Structure formats: C-alpha cells, structure tokens
Amino acid sequence: METSPISIPQPLSGEEIKKGIAERIAAEVSPEHAEAIKGIIYKDLGKTCSLESSTAYSKFKADWILSYWETKDGLHVDWWIEYELDDFGRITKGAIGNRSAEVPKSATNLASQIEETPPDRFRRETSQPIPKVVELKKAEPQQVTFSQAKRGPGRPRNV
C-alpha cells in the first residue's frame, strides 16, 4: 500500500514576509498610490536584519499604521510596523518605520493588523509562489567495502 507524502509548509523567509507586508498594506491604499507606497515600505523593511532573506519564521503577526499625503514635492508616507516573528517558539519582537515630524490633517490615515496566517496561505494571499514539495527518494542499499589491507608482522608489543 502506497501512502502519499506528507506536505509540510516551508517557513516564511524574511524576503517573503517583507513582500507580503508591503503587499497587504498597499492593498488598503488608493490605487494611484499603491505601487509607490508598496515600494517605499518594501525598501525600508530591508533595513531590519530580522527580515533578511536568509532568515525564516514559522509564523508572524504585525500591527501597522500608515499616513500618506501629496504635496507639490510629491508623495509623502508616514508609517510604522510593530511585528512579532516566531521561529518555532523563539519570538523576536521589533518595530520599524519612517515617522514624519508633522502629518497634515488632510493626510489619509490607515491602520490594521496582519494576523498569524499559515505560511502557504499567506503566500497565496500575497501572490507569492509556494515552494514545491520535495520528495526524497528512499536510499538504495549500498555495498559496503572495507579495506582488506594486510598488516605486516610489525613489532611485538610489550605490555
């Protein structure tokens, strides 16, 4: 009887978390500013070593706030994210953002949470690829060969 392989979701890399956070926040923003804000947040999230591409976490959650406004100088973004990264029980808490000294009253203000989500569901929801399941082949019996080196007569040992 053949059993199907068990699929265990791969942990989220720091890179996937950065992309996902930026995607989730941009989804709440007006369409004309979404791409610009997504780029700004993604770039700035790269400033935290907790979200390097070499890191991985089984789950995470985050609270975020965002204010944005336009002036004759262009788009201004004020944002802050507080996150909790869970590496199979080892919790890393942190916060990152770009806070302005003054946010005008005419700014658009948003706030929300990113709840703990299973890794593959988070990837799907943020349009990221899901890693393929790798099935390991059963090891083939190996021929064990030991060296049949002959020892010479050697010297007698006095014990």
Image: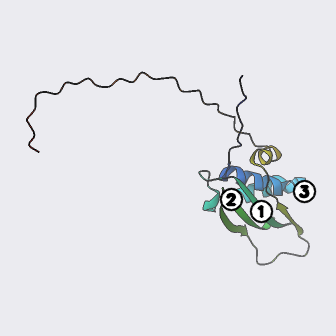
Q: Residue at x 8, y 35 (%)?
A: 155
Which element is circle 1 on? Answer: strand
Q: Residue at x 10, y 32 (%)?
A: 154
Q: Nearer the viewer, mark 2 or mark 3?
A: 2
- Pick whichever of labels 3 and 1 is earlier in the sequence: 3
Q: Nearer the viewer, mark 3 or mark 1?
A: 1
Can you tell which quarter of the image residue 10 is in? top right
Q: How is the image coloured?
A: rainbow
User: Callout 3: 10 Å neighbours few (<14), some, many (20+)?
Assistant: few
Marking on residue 91: none
User: Callout 1: 10 Å neighbours few (<14), some, many (20+)?
Assistant: some
Under mark 2, the amino acid is Asp
Q: Quadrant of the C terminus?
A: top left
Kindly identify which residue carries mark 3: 30
Q: CA distance from mark 3 to mark 1?
A: 21 Å
Q: Quadrant of the N terminus?
A: top right
Kindly identify which residue carries mark 1: 62
Q: Residue at x 71, y 23 (%)?
A: 2
Kindly identify which residue carries mark 2: 86
Under mark 1, the amino acid is Ala
**Is residue 7 in view?**
yes
Q: CA distance from mark 2 to mark 3?
A: 31 Å
Residue 48, above or below 130: below
Locate residue 7, reporting x and y percent.
Answer: 72, 37
- Left or right relative to 158: residue 146: right
**Is residue 73 in view?**
no
Locate residue 34, reporting x and y percent.
Answer: 84, 54
Residue 60, above or below 65: above
Q: Are marks 1 and 2 in contact (CB under 8 Å)?
A: no
- Left or right relative to 149: residue 111: right
Which element is circle 2 on? Answer: strand
